[in-house]
Amino acid sequence: MEIKLLHKDMNEKEIIERIKKIKAELGKKLVILAHHYQRKEIVYLGDYGGDSFELSRKATENNDARFIVFCGVNFMAESAEILSQPHQTVQLPDLDAGCWMANMADISIIDEAWEQAVSVIGKDRITPVVYMNADAVIKDFCGNNGGIVCTSSNTPNAFKWSFSRREKIFFFPDKHLGRNTANKMGIPPEEVIIWNPETPFGGNTKEAIKNAKIILWEGYCLVHTRFQIEDILKMRTKFPDAKIIVHPECPQEIVGQADAAGSTSFIVNYVDQAPAGSTIIIGTEINLIERLAHEYPDKQIFPLKHSLCPNMFKINLANLLWTLENVGKVNIIQIPDQIKKGAKKALDRMLTL
């Protein structure tokens, strides 16, 4: 509310011009990162746009950058902070921009689940694998237990790396990405179990835990679980020649009915490479789809269903301007060195793949 009142007399055009002026004044000292799911006006003001980890790497490898403003959600800004150089400060325009999925994996509950799983199968037989969409403390846990971080595009490689070391995987926090990856790798469904943290041993028998090759945490993305089979059937009827592309955070039933599934960058590249006149139905966050439709007028691009990420939407022109007017002073992301150390272990293992 205070931020809105601060700029209540400025219209959108004036705010944009003020942001551009600050960018010009700070020059190479400032880098604005904009995730694909941000409002288009935020994306167009960013120095870099893309997936969360891709953005973090670009910014922190830029030695001239002193201030990194991440237009995304908390775990993304944390990743930038983990990889940042000592002279760099990471800021998030709205600290309330969390992540539904990341919030489903609390470290105290994961610690308890890990101990239960290890008590059944032994610590040397299982590797924790954490999706990028998780808090820094979860990445730290994985790093300190011989685990690895993965993105939606390299999950199969992270799984292969893990299986080359130990025979089982405990995957956090997205059960759908984990299930779709297991399917892609040809792992039988009976060797994949779900761990419900609200019940002892995740609601599984000890025998089931011993027989499982992959244990999936009971977590999911609010955006990508809104899609239903009925949505696909409706679009198939309306656009029989269209290709339907979805994100692997969607349930396996949706992925199975789609023409292709892949990360956000995969979706962007798919649209870019599709021939003019193509009709593409996309199952992911609505802001990305609307921007793609705007940027590729020679193609018909429609959402499988309107699905908005409310946390991504918390970043707006007003709080971005407020952050830039207080660059290096407000909403600074700080992670204790000990947690950064363990989390970076897990991230570095991913970078070696």
Image (cartoon, grey):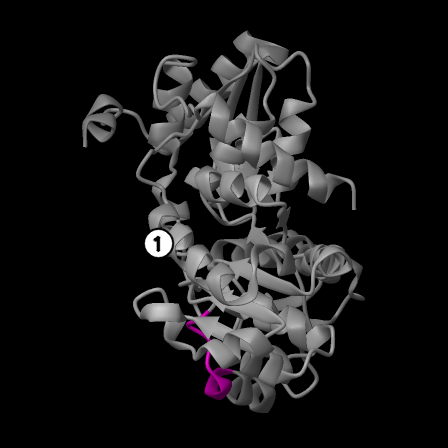
What percent of the width, then of the height, locates residue 235?
A: 55, 84
Q: Is the residue 81 above or below the residue 174 in the image?
A: above
Q: Is the residue 133 above or below the residue 308 in the image?
A: above
Residue 240 occupies which quadrant of the picture?
bottom right
Q: Which element type, helix, strand or loop, lies under badge 1?
A: helix
What percent of the width, then of the height, locates residue 225?
A: 44, 71
In the foreground, 175 or 224 = 175
Q: Amino acid at mark 1?
A: Ile
Q: Is residue 1 visible?
A: yes
Task: Judge whether residue 268 is colored magenta.
Answer: no
In the image: residue 342, left or right of residue 258: left
Q: Residues within 10 Å of mark 1 (few under 14, many from 20)?
A: few
In the image: residue 322, left or right of residue 170: left
Residue located at (60% from left, 32% from top): 344
Residue located at (34% from left, 42% from top): 314
In the foreground, 169 or 254 = 169
Residue located at (61% from left, 79% from top): 191
What percent of the width, then of the height, locates residue 120?
A: 50, 67
Q: Is the residue 91 above or below the residue 289 in the image?
A: above
Q: Which residue is mark 1?
A: 109
What percent of the width, then of the height, locates residue 183?
A: 67, 77
Q: Is the residue 250 above or below the residue 339 in the image?
A: below
Residue located at (61% from left, 55% from top): 292
Over which residues does the magenta segment extend? 225-231
In the foreground, 351 or 1 = 351
